[in-house]
Image (cartoon, rainbow, N blue to C red):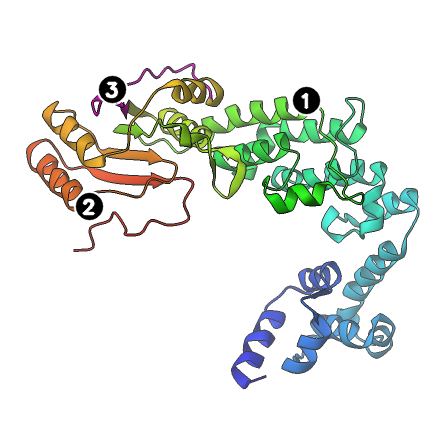
Amino acid sequence: MGSGMRRFISKWYLSQDPYDLALEVTRIKSRHKWSHADLIKLARVRTKDPAVSAVLKAVVRGLAAAQEEFKDKPEAQPILEYMTCVKEINQCSEPEVAIKLIDKHSFDVESLPTHLLNHAKVWEHAISRLPVRGVLSHLRTMAKRGFLTNESSPVLGKVLQSIRDPLALAASKLQPADILSVIAQVESCWEHPPTTAHKAKTQSPNYVKIPSPHHSLITGLQKMLVSSLSHVPKVPCSVVICVDCRPTITKGCWGLWSLKAVKAMSLTILALMKGGADITLTTLGEDKLMKQLPLNTTDTVETLGSRLEKVKGGVMDPALLMRWAREGTKRADLVICMTDSHAEVDREDLWTELELYRSTVCPVKHIYMALSSKSLFPTIANKT
């Protein structure tokens, strides 16, 4: 290991608060066959801070050695007591004892050993200490253990209580897109894409499917999604949106095979509308003519998405959209083209139409969104 890498690793360890460092080294002991002890020894991490030194010593030589070496250092005692409590809960096998330790030392789910997470009572106490974002990130773990299947499950009750809390939602700063992604995963029971390899895996006698969560969870998440729309930034403006309404909009997007691109499009449109945008929703028909689509303030992701799926659309043409807007003198601050993965765009024609629109109607920005693609090649942007 070179001196630069040693300085980089040392800087990370020494920049941590002692309690944060203690939590990190006990929560994640190793990754990719590298442990904290390996890194600390190779980087020769040293400090004069007794508290941090005690944590480093406990990682490399064990907690008993750290307690012996720093027994005369008052600054190190609180952190050593904390690490003793962490060790105690890691060795605990009784859920009742674990619950007392959780209440006494404010442990969260991240600091609990895996074997304790098999007990519903532990989750009941731990969920109340998690922020909403943390609850959503652990839904799969709870569902895998069957804690979200029955309506009478106390764990499900705690989860619903968390996601229904409007103050917790506001504090979480969760975006509607975050919640929609969670809904898609819950509805698919966190299944992998239905590829040939995965289908073969499901035929194995050792394969265990995650139990379907109770419908009240999906209902609660959908209401949470609606509530989150009221927290989007307010940006009053005029927006022209053209949606690619071909059947391919039912493909997965945002890295999730179970999230239809049409739902992501619908959510984006509704979020803009909730943010104060005056939206003109259009599509390009099979006859190569622009068509304006209805958009209501009462629309939801489901209702708008369902209408868009029924529209028979043609191949997306951003230049034709700009020409239609220019000839109709439709003033807009922003023009958005939404497609699943269509990347064949006449770039020169588009930029010619954009310049004509800007010179004859008003200044405008153009966004081309391919929600099912990781990147666009060639790019649409004019780099000149």
The residue pinned by badge 1 equals: 215
Tell me which segment is drawn in magenta: 282-300
Residue 347, numbered circle: 2
Q: Which three-letter amino acid code belongs to the residue tagged 3?
A: Lys
Q: Earlier in the sequence, mark 1 or mark 3?
A: 1
Measured as percent of width and height from the top left, residue 87 is found at: 85, 60
Task: Judge left or right: residue 290 versus residue 269.
Answer: left
Which quadrant is home to the C terminus? bottom left
Task: Judge left or right: residue 120 versus residue 178.
Answer: right
Measured as percent of width and height from the top left, residue 301 is found at: 47, 23
Q: Earlier in the sequence, mark 1 or mark 2?
A: 1
Please say if the residues under marks 1 and 3 sit with CB atoms less than 8 Å apart. no
Please say if the residues under marks 3 and 2 sit with CB atoms less than 8 Å apart. no
Q: Which three-letter amino acid code belongs to the residue tagged 1?
A: His
Mark 3 neighbour density, 10 Å: few (under 14) some (14–19) many (20 or more): few
Q: Which residue appears at 6% of the width and 33% of the height?
A: 360
Secondary structure category for the residue under label 3: strand
Q: Distance from label 3 to label 2 (Cα)?
A: 22 Å
Residue 291, numbered circle: 3
Measured as percent of width and height from the top left, residue 86 is found at: 81, 58
Q: Which three-letter amino acid code belongs to the residue tagged 2?
A: Arg
| Quarter of image, res 209 | top right
Q: Nearer the viewer, residue 246 or 106?
A: 246
